[in-house]
Every structure is written in C-alpha cells, then in structure tokens.
Image: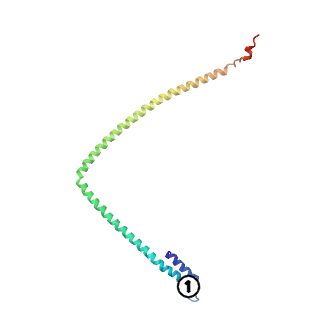
Amino acid sequence: MDILHLIDRLEEAIKEHKRLPFGGLRLVDERRLWPLLDQMRISIPDEVRRAERIIREKERTLAQAHEEAERIIALARSEAAQLTAEHTIAQAAERQAAAIRERADREANNIRIGADDYGFEILCKLEQELKRALTVIENGIRTIQVERAGSENKPPAEEKHDSDVSQTP
C-alpha cells in the first residue's frame, strides 16, 4: 500500500477524534491507529527498497553513460588521428568528388535540356493534332447546322401510303 495513502488515513483518524478543551490535545482510540501504524511499518521498507532500487538503477545508468561517453571520445580521437594521417588522401578524394559532381551536373543538365526539347516537340505535335481534330469537329458541326437550316426551310414532303399505291383505277 502507498505510504502517503496510509498517512492520509492516519490523519483522518486523528481528526475524527474529540479535542480536549483548553489545549491542542485529542482523545484517540488506539485500536483504530495501531493497524494503520502496522501497515505503515510494513509499507515503509517496501518504499525504501523501491527508492534504493531506483537509486541503484540511476547510478548504473550513469555509469553506463560515462563508459559510453569515454568509449565515444576514444573512438573520436582515434578517427581524428586516422583522418589527420589520411588528410592528403581526403583532399585528393574531395577533388575527385568535385570533378565527378561537376561532370554529373553537366550530364544532368544536358539530359534535362534534351527532355525539355523532346517534351516541347511532343506538345507541338499534339497541338497540331488537336487543331486538326478541332477543325474536323467544327466542320461537322457546320455541316449539321447547314443541313438543319435547309430542312427547316423545306415544306414537308407528301407521304405516300401503301394503300394509295395498291388502289389503282
């Protein structure tokens, strides 16, 4: 049980008892307080053990962190020494990398220009095809409009029925 909870219960038990007049004394029923005190005696060692365990864990974590820090520092010093020894190699590698980057940038730019040219060419062809298709569509619309206008101006043709053809005088 949590020690703070037990202390709260003890305090409540004391407050429930009567205060003696003319002083700060209270009459307390021991039978209600002894069980709380016993629970507190049991709970305190658990709390202390838990706190000690937390402190040990913290100390172990700190020790590990110090060891790791020392290992990282030693590794960094070793790498720094190695890099210093390889300084000329690093400079040569940097020059070579710069040349490779420059060549790659030129090639990428040429590819980009070629892709732009190809895209422009395709879009121009597509534009021409769409213009041709639009012309065909516009011509079809005009033809239909002319036919409609011509059929609206004509009087309706007389229809011949089959019965008229079969009745000959």
Q: Residue furthest bottom?
A: 22
- Please state which amino acid type lies under the numbered disc 1: Arg
Left or right for 32, reference 123: right
Reading the image, the residue beneath label 1 is: 31
Q: Is residue 112 left or right of residue 83?
A: right
Residue at screen point 57% across, 82% down: 15
Q: Residue at x 29, y 45 (%)?
A: 98
Q: Quadrant of residue 100?
A: top left
Residue 109 pos. (x, y %):
35, 39
Helix, strand or loop status at disc 1: helix
| In this view, 156 is above or below 84 | above
Spot occupied by residue 61 in the image (x, y as percentages of width and height): 37, 67
Seen in the image, is 46 located left or right of residue 146? left
Q: Position of residue 167 (x, y in %)?
A: 75, 13
At label 1, counting other C-alpha atoms closer than 10 Å, the crowd grade (few under 14, some 14-19, many 20 or more) is few
Question: Quick one: 113 or 81, which is closer to the camera?
Answer: 81
Q: Residue at x 50, y 28 (%)?
A: 131
- Residue at horizontal 47 percent and vertical 30 percent from the top: 127
